[in-house]
């Protein structure tokens, strides 16, 4: 009789222990599933963010490439034309009331300067410098044209090639547009460079 009672008690204890172990394993499984779900969600969100960032960088790169190409064409074209028609360019600059005293210096430095800026835009490592220089030069050109239109009694044109056929008002619009393009290029490429620095630092 005592042996039978002892056997039943052992069976009861074993069942309870088994139930406790089973319940704990269920709770642990649920906990692991609950922990796994946020990780999967986080990974998915991170992946989507990376994909969006990649698409943004691609668009940004494309815009910067287009702006750089336009500026390269402009500076190579104007620089070469100024060199080919150097004497006339120097003479026309000497007629300007605002740069008359500096016409020789500007005539000798501007065409090589434009070609150097174009070269800086071509090389990716120096592109940001080239974009800054492009913005500064186009801003100066635009300001000079505005001063000439508003305060000069004579409007000599030192441009070469097709640009020489444009009116001064057309020059103002044309240069203003390229000034804005250069500024946009500076902003976009500076952001791009910063993102690349952050990625390399990780």
Image: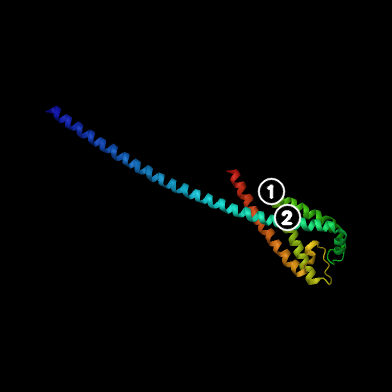
What residue is shown at x 41% (from left), y 44% (from top)? Answer: 36
Residue 80, numbered label: none
Please state which of residues 201 and 83 is positioned toward the viewer in this rendering.
Answer: 83
Q: How far apart are the alpha carbons under marks 2 and 1? A: 13 Å
What residue is shown at x 23% (from left), y 33% (from top)? Answer: 14
The answer to whether residue 40 of the structure is visible from this angle is yes
Task: Please name the residue that numbered disc 1 is placed on.
Answer: 124
The total number of labels drawn is: 2
Most extreme residue toward the left is 1
Quarter-of-image position of residue 147: bottom right
Q: Position of residue 32 (x, y in %)?
A: 38, 42
Please state which of residues 98 and 12 is positioned toward the viewer in this rendering.
Answer: 98
Task: Please name the residue that numbered disc 2 is placed on.
Answer: 72
Q: Crowding at label 1, few (<14), some or many (≥20) Cα neighbours within 10 Å?
A: few
**Label 2 or label 1, whichever comes before in sequence order:** 2
Instruction: Look at the numbered disc 1 and give the secondary structure of its residue.
Output: helix
Q: Position of residue 173 (x, y in %)?
A: 72, 67
Q: Is residue 25 left or right of residue 93?
A: left
Quadrant in the picture for the C terminus: top right
Q: Is residue 101 left or right of residue 60?
A: right
Quarter-of-image position of residue 152: bottom right
Please state which of residues 193 and 66 is positioned toward the viewer in this rendering.
Answer: 66
Instruction: Look at the numbered disc 2 and give the secondary structure of its residue.
Output: helix
Q: Is residue 153 left or right of residue 123?
A: right
């Amino acid at each position: 009789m005592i042996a039978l009672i002892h056997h039943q008690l052992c069976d009861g204890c074993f069942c309870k222990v088994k139930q406790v172990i089973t319940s704990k394993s269920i709770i642990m499984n649920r906990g692991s599933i609950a922990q796994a779900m946020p990780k999967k969600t986080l990974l998915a969100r991170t992946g989507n963010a990376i994909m969006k960032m990649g698409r943004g960088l691609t668009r940004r790169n494309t815009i910067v490439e287009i702006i750089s190409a336009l500026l390269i064409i402009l500076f190579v074209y104007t620089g070469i034309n100024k060199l080919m028609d150097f004497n006339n360019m120097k003479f026309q600059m000497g007629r300007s009331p605002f740069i008359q005293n500096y016409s020789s210096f500007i005539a000798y430095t501007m065409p090589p300067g434009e070609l150097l800026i174009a070269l800086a835009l071509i090389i990716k490592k120096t592109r940001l410098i080239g974009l800054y220089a492009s913005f500064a030069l186009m801003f100066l050109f635009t300001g000079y044209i505005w001063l000439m239109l508003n305060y000069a009694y004579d409007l000599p044109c030192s441009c070469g090639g097709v640009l020489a056929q444009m009116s001064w008002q057309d020059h103002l619009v044309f240069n203003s547009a390229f000034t804005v393009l250069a500024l946009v290029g500076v902003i976009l490429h500076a952001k791009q460079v910063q993102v690349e620095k952050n990625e390399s630092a990780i």
